[in-house]
Amino acid sequence: MPRMILACTVNDEPVEALIQPYQTLLDVLRDTIGLTGTKEGCGTGDCGACTVHLDGQPVCSCLVLAMQARGRAVRTIEGLAEGDALHPLQDAFVRFGAAQCGFCIPGVLMSAAALLAENPSPTEEEIRYGIAGNLCRCTGYTKMVDAISEVAGAAGGKA
Amino acid sequence: MMRLSPFTYLAPRTLAEAADLLAEHGRQTPTMVVAGGTDLFPNMKRRQQEPKVVIGLRGVPELRGISTDRDGWTLIGATTTLAQAARDPHLGQQYPALAHAAHAVSTPHLRTTGTLGGNLCLDTRCNYYDQSYHWRKSVDFCMKRPESNPAAICWVAPGSPRCWAVSSSDCAPVAVALRARFRLVSAAGERIVEAGDFFRDDGIEYLARRPDEILAQILLPPTDRSWRTVYLKLRRRGSFDFPILGVAASVKRGNSTVEDARLVLGAVGSAPVDATELAQSLIGAEPTTEAVDAVAAQAYRGARPLDNTDLNYAWRKKMARVYVRRALADAARLDLHHDSGQVGAALL
C-alpha cells in the first residue's frame, strides 16, 4: 500500500506524518507521534478509553482513520492542561480521587471536557449521559460525576 | 488487539467522483464506501468485512446538511452525523421521532462520527456473527460470513435456508413510518426508492442497494401537526446499546378521530417489519385504550424474535405488546394514565 501524508494539528501543534491508510488515529497518536496518554481498550467503540477531540467533538480514535483527521484539529489528553496548570477537570479528578486503576480516565476527561464545552452547566443526568460512552471497569463513576459536577457548578451552573 | 487489514483509502471530493471510484474499483476488487465508520471499522477489525478499497465520503460536501425543497420535502444528506440530526431544530420540530431515533443510537462519541445514512445501511446483527474471526472459526463460520465453508449454516436456526441476522437500526423503522424515500446514486445514474422497499427481509442481502450505489440523500415528505410519530427503543442499558426492539408509530388525527395510522417494528427481523395494516384498525374512530390494546395484542402474536440478540427472546416478544401499546397511545395523544411505567431511558 502506498503511504499517505497526514497533515493536521495535534494539541495546537502542526503535525505531518507518513502513515498507512489503514492506520487508525489512535495508532498514529500512540505509535507514530508518541502520545501514549490516549488508551486503547476495546478497539470497537464500546469503552471510550481512546476518546480524543476532533474539531472539538469527542470521538473514539480507534474508529477514526488517521487520514480522516487530515486538515483537522486533534486534541488529546496531553493537550487538556494549559502548560503546567491542570485543566479544572483534571484538578477536580485529583482532589476527588476519581481515578482507581486510571486506564479509563484520559477518555472520561476528554468526554467531560467536550460536554462542558457544549453545555457549561449540565445536570447530573446530563453528565452521566455525557460520559455514557466511557466504561470504567473499576466502576468508579460516582466520584467522576461528583468531580465533573463541581467543575460545572464552578462554571456558574447548577451542580 | 485487533487491527484493520490493509486497504487502499480513497477520498473523493464530489459525489460523482465517489460513484465513479466505486464503479471502477468495485468491478475488480472488494470495495466499500464508508461515512462515519463506527459500524464498518469494528466489523473490519473482526474480519466480518474485508474490503481492499475503502472510499471515504467525509470530504463530499453535497452529502452533508439538511434543507427543504419547494414542495416542502426535507432533504437530509446521508453523511449528516447522528449528533447533527439529533439536535437539528427543523428535524426536531417537524420530524421529532427521527431526531429522537438518531439521539437513541449508541453514545455521544459515536454519534459525532456515525451518520444517518450509515445507520440506515447498518449491517444486520447476530450473536453468531458479531464476533471476532477466531470466535467464529471456533464454532464454525455461519452462512452470513461463511469464509471457505460452502456448507455453512445459520447457527440460530440450523434447519433454515436463510440468514436471520437482525436489522438493528434505530432510524430505519422511523424512516419507513415517515414514508421517507432514499436517493441512490451510481456511475450509471440515480434512482429514488421508498424506504419500505429499501430494506429486504434477508440477513445477508438486507438492502436493495446495488453494490455500485451510494445512499446520497434521505427525503422526508411534508408533514403537519395532525401527524404525530413516536419512536420507542428497548435495550439493556439506558444509553448505548443497539435496539432489541424498536417501535415507530405514526397517527394522524382529525378533530377527534384517527384519520391514518402506521406502525413499524425494528429489531425483530432482518428488515423493519411494517405492521401498518394492524394499526389501520384505529382509523375512523376516536382512539381508545381498548383499540390500542387490540393492535398491541395482534403485534404480539405476529412478533417472532429469535434467540440471536441481547436478552431473552420470549421476554422480547412480550415487550412487543407493551411497546406497541405505549407507542401507539402516545402517537394517538391517548393518555395511558393508569400505566405509569418508564419507557426506555429517562433521558430519551
Image (cartoon, rainbow, N blue to C red):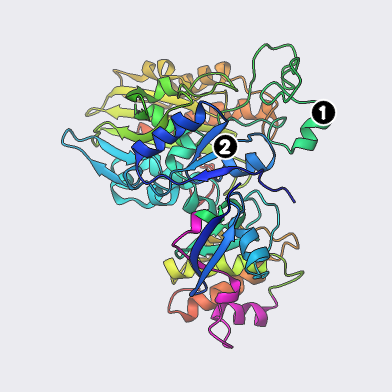
Q: Position of residue B163 (x, y in %)?
A: 64, 19
The secondary element bearing badge 2 is classed as: loop
Dot 1 falls on a residue whose secondary structure is helix
Could you tell me the amino acid type at mark 2? Answer: Pro
Q: Name the residue under label 2.
A: B243
Q: In this view, does B106 lie above or below A5?
A: above
* Residue A116 percent location from the top left of the image: 47, 70
Q: Could you classify mark 1 by the number of other residues whose Cα lies within 10 Å: few (under 14), some (14-19), or many (20 or more)?
A: few
Q: Mark 2 lies on which chain?
A: B
On the image, the x and y values in percent for residue B17 come to 37, 38
Pick the front one: B78 or B234: B78
Query: Separation of disc 2 and disc 1 at Cα?
Result: 26 Å
Chain of the residue under the numbered disc 1 shown in the image = B
Q: Residue at x 53, y 67 (%)?
A: A16
The residue positioned 72% from the left and 26% from the top of the image is B147
Q: Which of B325 and B130 is in front in this view?
A: B130
The residue at the point 74 percent across, 59 percent down is A137
Relative to B207, is A95 on the left or the right? right
Indicate whether B148 appears above or below B215.
above
Q: Is residue A118 visible?
A: yes
Q: What range of the chain is rendered magenta? A: A68-97
Question: Are marks 2 and 1 in one subunit?
Answer: yes
Q: Is residue A95 magenta?
A: yes
Residue B203, image quadrant = top right
**Residue furthest right in the image:** B138
Where in the figure is residue B308, as x and y percent of width and height?
69, 28
Q: Give the label on residue B139, or none.
A: 1
Identify which amino acid the numbered label 1 is placed on.
Val
